[in-house]
Amino acid sequence: MEPAHEDSGPLTPEQPWPARQKFQDRRGLNALLFLLTLVSTTWAGALHYAGFLDDFSGTMSLQLPLPLPALVLRGFWYSGTILAILGCHELGHYFACRYYDVDASLPFFLPFPIALTGTAGAFIRIREQIPRKHMLFDIGIAGPIAGFAVAVPALFIGVWMSHVVRVPPDTPGLVDLGEPLLFRFASWLFWGTAPDGYSLNMHPVAFAAWFGLLATALNLFPIGQLDGGHVSYAVFGQRSTYVTIAMVGVAVGLSYFSSSLVVWTAMSIGMLFAFGFRHPRVPDEDVPLSRTRMVLAVLALIIFAVSFTPAPFRPVDLIRR
C-alpha cells in the first residue's frame, strides 16, 4: 500500500515558490524552425549544385542541368553540411550549459530563403546569468570549437570534390568569395595555383564549409556578447571593453571596403547599444584563468585568423572594373 500524501494547501509567505525547472523548451518551435531551415537550405543547395554543374557557362538560366526532383535531392549536399556545422556550434554551447547547469534553450535555426546561404544562422538562449568566469569561458568557446571541428573536414572533402575551370570573361552575375587562409591552403593542397582566367568551381559542400568558417570567425570577433566577446572578457576582465571599442572601429573600417559586412557590423553595433558596451560582470572577475584555458584562448585566436575573410562577397563585374 502506498502512503497517503497530505495536501500541502496554498503557498504561504513562508513557503517559497517552486523553482522553475531548467532546460524546458517548446520543442515544437525548435523543430518547426529546423524543418523550415532544412527546406530553405536544401533549395539553396539545389541552386548551388545547378551552378556547380553549369561551370560558369551561364546556361543555367536557359534550362536546368537536371530534373528538378534530382536537383533538390542534390541540395542535401549543402543543407546537410551547413546544418551540421551550425548545429554542432550551437550544441557545443548547449551541452556546456548543461554541464554547468546553466539554463539554456535548444538551438533555434533561422531560415532565410532569399539569401545565398538559405539561412541566417542559429542561436540558443541562455536564460540565467553565468555565475563563474571559467564557466563563461567554457560556454563561450565550446561553440566555435565544435563548429570548426565539423567545418574543417567538410572543407577538405568539399574542395576535393570541386574542380578548376576557365571563367568566361563576359559571364554576368558571378560572385567572388573571399578566401580565408584555411580555404586557400585546402585549395592549394588539392589543386595547386590556378592559372590566370581559371577559378575553383566550388562543390556545394565546399561552399557550406566556407560559410561555416565565416560564421565561426564572425562569432569569434571580440565584441560585446558574441562568443569572442565572452572569451575576451574572461581573459582581460573589464579591459575587454577597450577591445570591444577597438574592434567596432575595425568592423566599421572593414565595412567601408566591403559592403557585404555592413549588415553584420550594424547588427553588432545595435547589440552593443541594446545590451551595453561593457560585458556583464561575474563575481570572480579577477581570478585568472587556468593555463589550459589560456591555451584554448590562443586556439580561438588561431581559428579566427584562419577562418576570417575581410571581403566575403564581391561581384566579379566590379572586380574587373
Image (cartoon, rainbow, N blue to C red):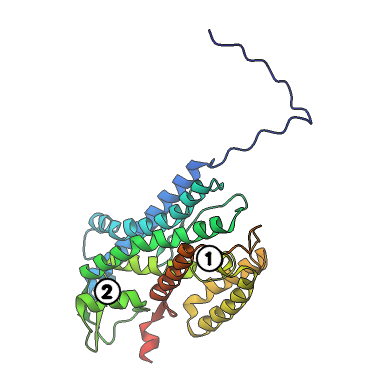
User: What is the x, y in percent for residue 204?
Assistant: 29, 65
User: What is the x, y in percent for residue 41?
Assistant: 37, 58
- Secondary element under disc 2, as helix, strand or loop, is helix
At x 45%, y 72%, the residue is 301
User: What is the x, y in percent for residue 160?
Assistant: 21, 69
**Near-viewer residue (52 or 6):** 6
Q: Earlier in the sequence, mark 2 or mark 1?
A: 2
The alpha-carbon separation of the residues under discs 2 and 1 comes to: 28 Å
- Categorize mark 1 by other alpha carbons within 10 Å: few (<14), some (14-19), many (20+): many
**Near-viewer residue (230 or 29):** 230
At x 70%, y 33%, the residue is 17
Depicted 30 relative to depicted 7: above or below? below
- The residue tagged 1 is 231
Discs 2/1, front: 1
User: What is the x, y in percent for residue 112?
Assistant: 45, 60
**Near-viewer residue (257 or 134):** 134
Q: Is residue 66 visible?
A: yes
Specify the amino acid type for callout 1.
Answer: Val
- The residue tagged 2 is 186
Q: Is residue 107 visible?
A: no
Query: Which image quadrant for residue 44?
Result: bottom left
